[in-house]
Image: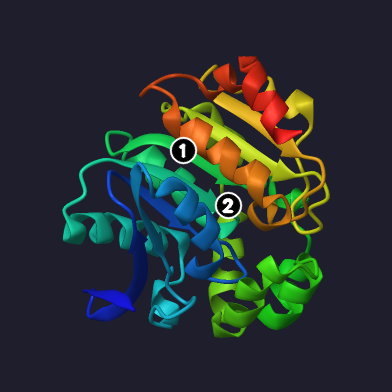
């Protein structure tokens, strides 16, 4: 297990591969562990880091650090501690919220951004996400495939106060504004059958800048990286392969990519 001390507390992370830095941030259920297949897919050309946020996995459980602004500060201090000047960033659920906020505040650090299962408004968040204990949330959001075992294993480690605190913070945020003002290339991924977060309507996405693109996974729920693993990792690899500053909307023009994900 790898860990650093930030703010006198333990922050757990894992790292795999060599190359340009890539950071994965987990969601409200689980920890770094469910990113392993995606880390492996990216590790041929990237040095992939996966971090446990405050209150999750093996990182310290301290309610004073559960606000989203504190999770963003964790990212700032982690990158400084590791001497990482620029990153590609992938976030899911809560991790997507943190990734968007971090990118908004530190655009010079984030080269590109992939966010998965993030709401555009609080009305799109199922109330069960706040009220149920993490193991129950895992059973609700996951299918029975072996790939889901990593989330079930780690779910009990999550502090329910960390989940609630993040949702409280989100209630006062303007998510559409965050997307509209995201300067770097941003790929928005959503499982069409996600019971926790409603997928956005096309009309909501058309106002986003040219640098932002949406892809829906028609056979996925809240965890497209697990539900459609090969398709997700193919998309991730091609997104990471784009030239710096190139819009992810170019992905839809690649017929060979379309064939690979069918």
Instruction: Return the mark for residue 113.
Output: 1
Q: Position of residue 208 (x, y in %)?
A: 60, 23
Q: Residues within 10 Å of mark 2 (few under 14, many from 20)?
A: few
Task: Give left or right: position of 51 versus 238.
Answer: left
Image quadrant containing the C terminus: top right
For disc 2, the marked residue is 172
Comparing 204 with 33, the one in front is 33
- Please, is residue 36 above or below residue 230 in the view? below
- Please, is residue 183 above or below residue 169 in the view? above
- Please, is residue 193 above or below residue 70 in the view? above
The CA span between labels 2 and 1 is 23 Å
Asked if residue 163 shows in the view, the reply is yes
Residue depth check, mark 2 versus mark 1: number of the one nearer the observer: 1
Quadrant position of residue 37? bottom right
Q: Which is more N-terminal, label 1 or label 2?
A: 1
Quadrant position of residue 168? bottom right
* Residue at 33% across, 34% down: 107
Comparing 100 with 37, the one in front is 37
Image quadrant containing the N terminus: bottom left
Quadrant position of residue 195? bottom right
- Please, is residue 193 above or below residue 154 in the view? above
Task: Give left or right: position of 256 versus 217.
Answer: left
Q: Secondary structure at mark 2?
A: loop
Q: Position of residue 62 (x, y in %)?
A: 41, 82
Instruction: Return the mark for residue 86.
Output: none
Q: Secondary structure at mark 1?
A: strand
Count of numbered labels shown in the rendering: 2
In the rendered structure, are the residues bearing label 2 and label 1 in contact, judged by CB atoms less than 8 Å apart? no
């Amino acid at each position: 297990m790898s860990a650093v001390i930030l703010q006198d507390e333990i922050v757990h992370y894992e790292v795999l591969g060599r190359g340009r830095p890539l950071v994965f941030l987990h969601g409200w259920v689980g920890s770094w562990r469910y990113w392993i297949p995606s880390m492996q897919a990216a590790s041929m050309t990237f040095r992939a880091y996966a971090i446990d946020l405050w209150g999750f996995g093996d990182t310290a459980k301290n309610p004073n650090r559960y606000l989203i602004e504190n999770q963003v500060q964790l990212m700032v201090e982690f990158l400084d501690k590791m001497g990482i000047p620029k990153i590609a960033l992938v976030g899911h659920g809560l991790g997507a919220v943190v990734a968007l906020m971090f990118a908004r505040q530190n655009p010079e650090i984030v080269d590109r951004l992939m966010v998965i299962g993030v709401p555009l408004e609080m009305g799109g968040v199922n109330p069960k996400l706040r009220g149920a204990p993490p193991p129950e949330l895992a059973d609700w959001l996951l299918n029975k495939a072996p790939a889901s075992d990593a989330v079930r294993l780690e779910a009990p480690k999550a502090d329910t106060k960390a989940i609630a605190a993040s949702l409280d913070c989100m209630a006062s945020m303007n998510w559409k504004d965050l997307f509209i003002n995201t300067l770097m290339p941003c790929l928005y991924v959503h499982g069409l059958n996600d019971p926790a977060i409603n997928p956005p309507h096309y009309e909501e996405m058309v106002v986003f800048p040219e640098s932002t693109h949406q892809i829906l996974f028609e056979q996925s729920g809240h965890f497209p990286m697990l539900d459609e693993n090969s398709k997700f990792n193919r998309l991730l690899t091609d997104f990471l392969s784009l030239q710096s500053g190139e819009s992810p909307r170019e992905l839809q023009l690649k017929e060979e990519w379309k064939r690979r994900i069918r």
